Amino acid sequence: MNGQIGVYICECGPNIKDRIDIDKVIEDISSLGDVKTVKRFPLLCSNDGKKFLEEEIKKEDLSHLVVAACSPREHEKTFMDVCEQADFNPYLFQLINIREHCAWMISDKNEATAKAIKYIRAGIRRVALHRPLEKKEIESIPDVLVIGGGVSGLEASLSLAGKDRRVYLVEKTGSLGGMAKKLSQLLPNQGSNLSLIDEKVEQVHNNENILVSTSSTVGDVRGFLGNFEIVIHTDGETSGFRKAQVGAIVVATGFDVFDPEENSQYGYGIDNVFTAQEFEEQIKSGNVLLKSGKPPESVAIIHCVGRKERGYCSKVCCCYSIKFAHYLKDNLSNVNVSELYVDLCLPHKSDQEYFEEAKKKGVHFVRSEEEINVNQKGDQIEVEYHSEGKTDSIVVDMVVLAPAMIPSGDTPELAHLLNIPLDKSGFFKEIHEVLDPISTPIEGIYIAGCATGPKNIPESIVQSQAASGKILSSLIPGEKIVPEVKVSEIREEFCTGCQTCLSVCFYGAIRFDSFKGISVVNEAICRGCGSCVGSCPSGAIRSKHFTYPQLYREILEALR
Amino acid sequence: MKKQNVLVVGAGLAGMKAALLLANAGVTVYLLEKESLIGGQTIKFEEVYPNMECATCMVSPIQQDVLQNKNIELFLLSELESVEGETGRFKVKISKKARYVSLVNCIGCDACYEPCPVNLDNEFEENLSKKKAISVPCAGALPNVPNIDPENCLRLNGKKKECKACQEACVFDAIDFTEKDETLDLEVGAILVATGFDLFDIETLPQFGYGKFPNVYSAMEFERLYAQNGPTEGELILRKDGDLKSIGIIHCVGRKEQGYCSGVCCMYSAKFAHFLKHKIHEAKIYEFYTDLCIPGKSHQSFYEETRQKGVDFIHNETIRVESQKDRLQITYRDGNGSDSVVPMDMVILSPAMIPGKGTEQLAKTLGINLDKHGFFNTQNERLSPVSTEREGIFVIGCAEGPKDIPDSVLQAEAAVGKILASFR
Ligand SMILES: Cc1cc2nc3c(=O)[nH]c(=O)nc-3n(C[C@H](O)[C@H](O)[C@H](O)COP(=O)(O)OP(=O)(O)OC[C@H]3O[C@@H](n4cnc5c(N)ncnc54)[C@H](O)[C@@H]3O)c2cc1C
Ligand SMILES: Cc1cc2nc3c(=O)[nH]c(=O)nc-3n(C[C@H](O)[C@H](O)[C@H](O)COP(=O)(O)OP(=O)(O)OC[C@H]3O[C@@H](n4cnc5c(N)ncnc54)[C@H](O)[C@@H]3O)c2cc1C
Ligand code: SF4
Ligand code: SF4
Ligand code: SF4
Ligand code: SF4
């Protein structure tokens, strides 16, 4: 090969200069074939250094560029920017770390110099095989599909819809609002008043940029960020289907609740044992009554129903159980209210005060570490509990069960349709639980609200606004999308169609072309992680910037 | 309203995440940080629950992105002086202290620290180590550029005007003693407040023995003690040497006084136990809690895993720390009212998260309200959890109240959603 490789060594002040014999390095490297020039410079990352490099690239008419300096973490981007400035493809450049890996690591100057020479030689071998990679630009559609019309879906739709962005809101049931519409009231720190939810529903209906489909589900989804093709199925009177193109999707399908009948110890089925939702309805109708038509004189509210079975705390039930206690104390005179809890989960800054107020109103809080048993006792109900090693019981007129929040029924099918993963509890799984809690491995598909796990209404709203933040920041009307450049490709002639790679790709970038009988990488989705490359038994997959020859040449030279 | 510049106050995880997302949308962001480095509290951690990921590996790429982003203009050692105007056209004044070290010239070689004759307690390291008048607060600080503390530098405070030991050591011409404090005027369309939290002053509760017994530590001290990049490089070197056979972690310190649960201490206490069990297999680890607050879908399994490792979780109503001969001891009362005593070699206190210092002043400057606990108040009861009553000003992360990293990140992204939605 007739390369014109330029090698530039940074002195990094005394950092490299004092600990590596740069002249010796230059002498050694200069003798290599394909190397056009080797030069040293005091501080390449400085403005002078960058200008020098830019001029060198042009003046020396380089084919490839090697910089031997510090960690790529520190300055790879700096030098890639210099390349662009010089109209030089930045993928024809390689940064060699002789500071952290050599100068700072090895106290013996000769050894450090020898290692630096090996590194630079290896880099030169590798860079000679680099090919220019070009950025692609893809047109994108700003419109968004929102699945689920609970508070989360409503909020997402409202914050996304605008004159330059349409939202398709798909709700399975006949009306919008989800669970929030069925509640009796909200907590005081949430304004108590449910009219805010009604307002949101109305705003959605009145917004001409939101196309609402109730009694509908999503039938098909294909494509990638900026370019999804979707099909919406509608049942009932206006049955039919609608096709649309969207740039992003927000999944806000909410939750269901644990069925207390699953475990007989909770006594569901006994007269006057209700679930929390049934109790919300009773409060809403203004009639908290026993089967006999009389108001209860004593009520036990049982927390954590299904927590043990599900293996997680649902985070909101302690607070709404306290909401029930407040309601009872405020509306039924002389009612005796007991809350049987395991641990009180009061994680928000105003929760504890709400609890303390309930205590002041005379609500009994009873700690019960283990199993609770609910049994009929005459006209009444006996609740047996265990605390600090002792068994005790209370007899009450009414029992309210606070069941765990569980993934909504359609979650597995929807996950399959969208090709996004579920976590071990069956909720949609975030790409990174701590740093990126609403993104999925499929770029452009976001999850919000209780679809990702139990949470209250403000937290659900925050997630929806966060999804909007992500979409508004990345899918800008009129702007093109630039996907990852260092992607993988499958070479048709080697692929046997075994489809191993399909199961390996975390991002869903590989599709099977059944006509040709081979797998194909969608370069708009691929993030260049390289997992598929290693998995392919036929060696058919190539990572464009990490080809086998590049890596072999580099390693061979380093080991020589 | 068309696209405008945005001011973010506080460069912790919440502030950094918000700045990056705004910058990605092409918005110019002014990111204000009162310290000399960015990252906030999370850069002090070794690991992050619930997946025990390496904190540095998580946070430092974000810090790098912030430093390299062309749309983010960073103002370090800076604070907000005044805010005038209204949403869409806020006029803000910023005071920026002199760093005395050039962010452009300095390459972070650390040659200047050693020659400096001034030795100081390092507050960032919870005073577990010393630093010089010119220094970075910890290994791996970003930007990796020291600053000179003008109150303690002999030249700048006038005690030894001729000292220039640091300048002589610097071959990059990075040190400039003539740099002056500045005030800057900016115009922005929206303001994001991300000033984080502080921890409850545990010395005010004598029953826990902090300050009195050397081997009683605060949670943040423990974070630095077990951090690989901390003052002991991750070795559990105690203030008072001795065998570590029994370690107690006490939850909810200051909860009663503050009147709320901080929502994260149960989990990070379990994180400590997790680490300790791993580090010293034979030690007995006790967690003393009042209520276990482990909300969220994966937290309980982390707790259960910790318990399976042999960590004892003990419910208590009241608790105190005393000394007993050479060791410590914890006396607690359980739900039945009976007292028990357990001997201890080390005690870690998990204090309540409280509003950051200066929150009250900042609220005045911004013209927004505080809640009854002293955190910034938001429009939660209008179901708009990151908006304040002053349009165009948003509060995110722990500045709004105690929360963990995911919730802080979500609020950051949510505020960006609100702002970008208003820009069209
Ligand atoms: C008894 C009880 C009391 C509560 N009290 C309070 C309280 O006082 N304060 C508070 O803040 N929180 C409270 N909560 C929690 C609150 O209900 C939730 O935070 C909130 O409803 C979550 O909203 P969401 O939109 O995420 O989910 P949901 O309300 O569940 O809405 C999801 C929507 O998606 C639709 N959907 C589902 N699958 C599909 C599909 N495949 N295609 C299309 N649409 C689909 C559903 O029909 C539904 O309309 C309470 C919860 C319970 C169980
Ligand atoms: C001991 C401990 C362990 C923890 N462990 C975990 C864990 O494992 N996992 C987890 O998810 N969470 C954990 N947390 C919680 C986590 O620390 C917080 O969620 C997170 O730090 C919040 O980020 P923030 O950006 O809101 O605030 P901060 O990290 O406090 O950042 C605020 C920033 O604003 C700056 N600032 C303050 N005031 C001003 C001002 N006036 N002007 C300019 N700048 C200002 C500060 O200097 C700081 O840089 C832990 C907390 C503690 C106390
Ligand atoms: S929020 Fe309370 S009732 Fe609900 S699961 Fe958690 S501890 Fe149990
Ligand atoms: S490189 Fe990674 S993202 Fe790209 S196709 Fe292969 S496995 Fe998928
Ligand atoms: S001038 Fe002297 S005292 Fe001041 S920072 Fe430099 S070396 Fe330290
Ligand atoms: S100021 Fe100079 S000597 Fe000090 S770290 Fe920066 S470059 Fe090195």
Image (tube, grey):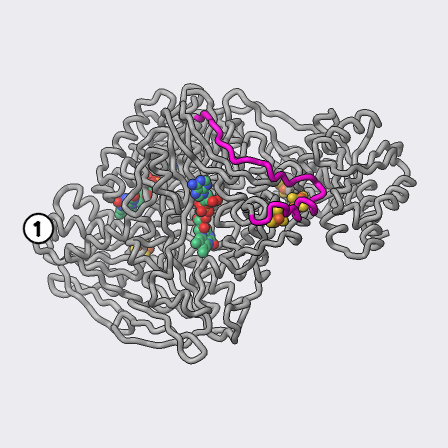
- Label 1 CB, ligand 1: below 8 Å? no
**Residue denoted by label 1:** A293
Residue A487 is left or right of residue B267, and the answer is right
Residue B311 in view (yes/no): no
Q: Quadrant of ligand 1?
A: top left
Residue A297 in the image, given as x and y percentages of width and height: 10, 57
In the image, is residue B293 part of the stretch drawn in magenta?
Answer: no
Residue A430 in the image, given as x and y percentages of width and height: 48, 44
Q: Which residue lies most toward the right here?
A: A31
Instruction: Look at the image and give the residue range highlighted in magenta.
Output: B159-188
Please state which of residues A327 and B150 is positioned toward the viewer in this rendering: B150
> In this picture, is B5 found above or below B364?
above
Figure quadrant of residue A224:
top right
Figure quadrant of residue A67:
top right
Residue A518 in the image, given as x and y percentages of width and height: 67, 37
Disc 1 chain ID: A
Residue B55 is left or right of residue A173, and the answer is right
**Residue at (32% x, 72% y) in the render:** B332
Residue A551 in view (yes/no): yes
Exactly how many numbered labels are in the figure? 1
In the image, is residue B161 part of the stretch drawn in magenta?
Answer: yes
Residue A386 in the image, given as x and y percentages of width and height: 26, 69
| Residue type of the residue flagged with mark 1 | Gly
> In this picture, is A189 found above or below A57?
below
Q: If the image is split into quadrants, where does the C terminus of chain B sit? A: top left
**Residue at (15% x, 41% y) in the render:** A285
